[in-house]
Image (cartoon, rainbow, N blue to C red):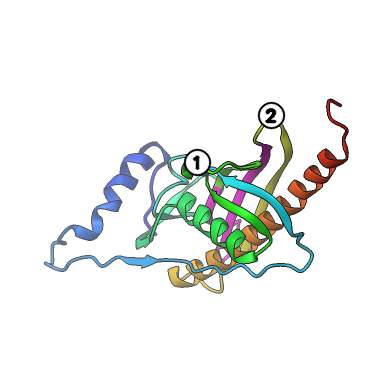
Amino acid sequence: MTRLPMSKLLASTCLLALAGCSVLAGGDRQSTTIYAPQVRITADPAWPQVDWQLAIAKPSAARLVDSPRINVRPTPGELEVYRGATWSQPATDMLEDTLLRGFEDSGRISGVARIATGIRSDYKLTIDLRRFEADYRGTELPAATIELNAKLIHSIDQRVVAARTFNTVENASSTATGDVAKAFETALDKTSTELIGWTLLSGQADAQRMAQTPAGK
């Protein structure tokens, strides 16, 4: 792990991103391992079949969270990054891609797309990704920690249909970076599965309420 003082964390993160391309004093080139979690969501039989369309907004996150670097928190007041390791894409992109594939592969929704495509949606899913880091939490082994807040919004009147904070903690089997990456893959699977199910159930409940409400009421 590379210890980064909080006051210099942003600048150090930028420099570390280039470290894999620099030549060390001994003439050797530092290698960088790229980790690309592969998540395939399995639809829950309890998920409803819906006939409305959903637009997924690009998740938002603080700059230090939305980074290709793999963050680790050894103590509550410190944030570091793993040396010689990186994600294949920033955390928000991983989450957005996983959700889009999960909704599509579930076969439970008539239409889903990124909001940037201009889809004419009935509902919009917005996400604030708060944490995407390994956290030791005072223990000997780190845990992949994903925390986000999601809001399901009715597209026509911008009404917040439902809002919820999701928090997933998945213990790594060792301190090795590869095992930490595997824990993140499991945590991303659990978080995305729970979020997809919540979205379908919340949206369907709202659609049914609207269908039962007389016009103008």
Q: Which residue is mark 1?
A: 118
Q: Which residue is mark 2?
A: 157
The quarter in which the C terminus is drawn is: top right
Q: Which residues are magenta?
A: 131-154
Do the residues bearing badges 1 and 2 touch, measured as CB atoms within 8 Å? no
Please say if 62 is above or below 182.
above
**Is residue 74 visible in the rendered structure shown here?**
no
The quarter in which the N terminus is drawn is: bottom left
Please say if 81 is above or below 121.
below
Q: Residues within 10 Å of mark 2 (few under 14, many from 20)?
A: few
Q: Secondary structure at mark 2?
A: loop
Q: Secondary structure at mark 1?
A: loop
Horizontal relation, residue 74 to residue 122: left or right: left
Q: What residue sits 56% from the left and 74% below the top?
A: 173
For this rendering, which residue is in front, 154 or 84?
154
Q: Position of residue 204 (x, y in %)?
A: 77, 49
Q: CA distance from mark 1 to mark 2?
A: 17 Å
